[in-house]
Every structure is written in C-alpha cells, then in structure tokens.
Amino acid sequence: MQIREATEADWPAIWPFFHAVVAAGETYAYPRDLDEPAGRAMWMLPPPGRTVVAVDADGTVLGSAKMNPNHMGGSSHIASASFMVDPRYARRGVGRALGEHVLAWARAEGYRGIQFNSVIETNTAAVALWQSLGFEIMTTIPEGFRHPTKGYVGFHVMYRKV
C-alpha cells in the first residue's frame, strides 16, 4: 500500500465510497444528501490542508484522508483530520496506515497535537483504532449525533499530542 497526495484525477474513485459513507449517515456529521460538488469541496482541501489517498500496487484507491489546521490564529498549532476507507477494503489496515501517515505529517509540519472533533461513539472500530494510535477521549457530547437507526448517540472529541 502506498499513501500519496490526492489529485483531481483521484476524485472519481473517492466519490463513490465517500458518497456511500455520507449517505448512510452513521459516521459523519455531513448532510446525508450531500451532492458531488459539495463533497469535493469538503474533501479535496487546498493548502494549508492536504488530502491523500491510499492505493494498492495496481493504483486502486482504497481510502483517503484529509488533514488541516483544526482552527486558525492562536489555535492553529493543533491539526485535525478525517478518514474514509472504501468499505470493500475494510479491515485491511488502510485506516491504520492513513492514521499513521497523518500523525507523521502533523509531526513534520510542527503541529503540537491532533484533535478529532466528532468521532461517533457507535463507530466502535474507529474509536478503537484511534485509541490504539494513542488518541484519548477528551469528552463525549451526549446525544450530539442523530444516528439513522440508533437515534441520538454521543460523539467523542479525541486528542493526541504529536
């Protein structure tokens, strides 16, 4: 698996799984009816943000991550990131590889930490992955997310120093 900068040519491979994940409404606080131009604008970040793809030896896009400063000004030393893995390639280490890549990026860019603003508590695989990479749950916002089948559930704010 290789992780590289995402290009505009990668978007047609990202959009189908991005759209499926967002439309499911289980793990992202994005509008479930998000259209393609809005999705592209949200995911394919200009600098100082960065978007990458994980690809296999054949160049197939397995997943993607975007990373950026979490806030501006006096809080611009804390990064944030979002991750999506094509469900067809789940449980193959793609999310972990992307997470490790983001940690290395944040360290190299001089960030002091990474904050995930909204990790849905029912997304137990993601919570476990981030905890295994050293992230801590700083707080949980009760009923902060409306899950399509489980109703109101919490979301975690997670953090890790880099």
Image (cartoon, rainbow, N blue to C red):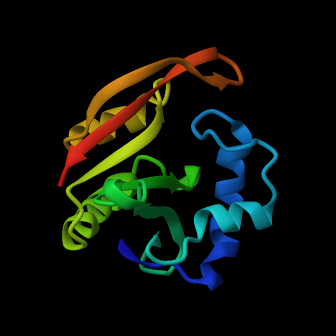
Residue 28, by quadrant, is top right
**Percent coordinates x, y for residue 48 in the rendering:** 43, 74
Q: Is residue 113 above or below residue 111?
A: above
Q: Where's the N terminus, which quadrant?
A: bottom left
Residue 140 visible in this rendered orientation of the protein: yes
Depth check, front residue: 99 or 139: 139
Residue positioned 65% across, 56% down in the render? 17
**Percent coordinates x, y for residue 86 in the rendering:** 56, 56
Q: Is residue 132 above or below residue 156?
A: below
Q: Is residue 2 above or below residue 35?
A: below
Q: Is residue 133 left or right of residue 89?
A: left
Q: Is residue 148 left or right of residue 71?
A: right
Residue 117, by quadrant, is top left
Depth check, front residue: 148 or 74: 74
Residue positioned 76% across, 41% down in the render? 32
Residue positioned 65% across, 71% down in the render? 13
Depth check, front residue: 81 or 63: 81
**Percent coordinates x, y for residue 162 in the rendering:** 17, 55
Q: Is residue 66 left or right of residue 21?
A: left
Residue positioned 22% across, 39% down in the render? 132
Residue 128, by quadrant, is top left
Toward the front, the furthest residue is 74
How many numbered circles does the render carry? 0
Residue 55 visible in this rendered orientation of the protein: no
**Percent coordinates x, y for residue 159 in the rendering:** 28, 40
Q: Is residue 9 above or below residue 25?
A: below
